[in-house]
Amino acid sequence: MTTRPRLTADQLATARGSAAGGRSQAFALPGYDRSAVTAGIVHIGVGNFHRVHEAVYVDRCLHLPGQEQWGVHGIGLVAAAASAAKAADLAEQDHLYSVTEFAPDGSHSSRVIGALVGYSHAPADPQAAQDRLAAPSTRIVSLTIGESTYNLAEGSGEFDLGLPAVAADLRERDRLPRTVFGVLVAALARRRAEGTAPFTMISCDNLRGNGDTTRRAVLGYARAVDPGLAHWIEDEVSFPNGMVDRIAPQVDAARREELNAITGLDDRLAVLGEDHLQWVLEDRFPAGRPRWEEVGVTFSDEVARYEAVKGRMLNASHVLMSHLAVLMGHRYVHDALADPRVYRLLRTFIDVDVLPLITGPAGVSLTDYRDRILSRFANPAVRDQLLRIASDGAAKIPVFHTVTVRTQVEQGLDLRREALLLLGFRRYLRGVDDRGVAFDVHEPLVSQQDLDACRGSDPRAVLRLPSFSALGLEQVPSFVEVFDELAVVMERDGVAAAVEQACSPRG
């Protein structure tokens, strides 16, 4: 392996000096003084997506005059060894990392991001994380924690206080909380007690009404701690909704080596993304915000429509494809799109099941958006992993498919693609594709009992999972009819045959 300079602040200074001397660099440099940047934003969950999305927008803002107070301080709440290793790498690299963006035509560009100016690994030092959240300089707290972590019970939509980790936080009041909403509520309680204005809270997760969802989770936890605190949060804390969009694949050791070969750096935190980047936000930031509108963020009162378009077209297509394509033997999104059966499935789903049922924001062409989605999925340079998208399907499927399937039921429309989706998810839970190749299944919301039921002989067991039972599809004769027909085809002839039948003209 080639020896390369480790990405650090010193190495950045060396690169800056080389650039000043006329030597070209394989990556763009931060064009601002990082020593002047302070953290006005705290972000919980500094994974790949945050580093190629929000942090990139912040980095752009830091190039504008008067924005140096809007750096990011990251917080990690997971105690796993990989999280501790990431904290160590961030510290060793002075919180610098590189982003390489790939366009569908194969072209790419790299940039070192300097927006992250600090990081606290809460399991190692919970007090440091709390101090950062409580600091008056912290004016925005953002989250990428995954759909299932919001802990809202199916049906009621209320925060689930019975989860073991949450119950432990509520019970063991002599220690600092460890769960995300316990940590957030404790910080807000401290700010209230100290007379510090609250921060604005934004979710960067793929959830419809992600600000509203965050608000429900925070208030649900707060009410269990102190109803008076919950009333204060309800009155004083802003939770703007937003829509986020960028494909950010996982980066294993081999891919990291490829990225470092492009930049010429030894960057243990190198990430990649597609060239598409989008963020739409409601402009509700009473504590102030960066001048994001000058660097590509859209502020709009139509966030719900942007969310509907993205969620019901892009995310729903991603989820629909992921389990089925894995079962057909594919492991990367671009390979799946090259399969005419998968491509036809997505075109049929978007054109027949989605486009007639949604209204886009003013000035947005839905057919152009569809074409852009398919082009992005087919980008071979991104090499996005289908298993990444397929994971946590019990949380994702209801988020991105509920409105579509309910509307189809109400209007008597074709339900075959939605039936195929749930059948594919059931078969995916077996952890073996149609070639007999095993793969890992990551479904934190599916209990062992439900997993065993779905792996049994009754296809309809998947309809009774807590994540899907609220849809009541087992009581919809038109759905059950196509579901049972496709179940027979899938079991007898395989997943590909079921996909083809689900896209065939109706008799």
Image (cartoon, grey):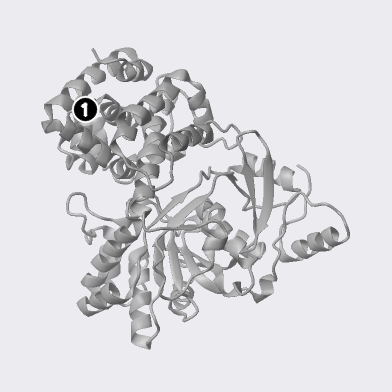
Farthest front residue in view: 363
Dividing the image into 4 quarters, which one contains the N terminus? top right
Residue at x 41% of width, y 21% of height: 344
Q: Position of residue 294 (x, y in %)?
A: 56, 62
Q: Position of residue 191 (x, y in %)?
A: 38, 81
Label 1's element? loop
Residue at x 21% of width, y 27% of height: 413
Q: Position of residue 254 (x, y in %)?
A: 64, 39
Residue at x 25% of width, y 20% of height: 487
Dividing the image into 4 quarters, which one contains the C terminus? top left
Residue 64, placed above or below residue 281? below
Pick the residue in front: 358 or 398: 358
Residue 179 visible? The answer is no
Q: Quadrant of residue 6?
A: bottom right
Is 495 on the left or on the right of 69, as rendered?
left
Q: As shown in the figure, which amino acid type bears the numbered disc 1?
A: Leu
Give the labeled residue for mark 1. 413
Is 387 on the left or on the right of 263, as rendered?
left
Residue 265, placed above or below residue 42? above
Pick the residue in front: 107 or 137: 107
Pick the residue in front: 230 or 364: 364
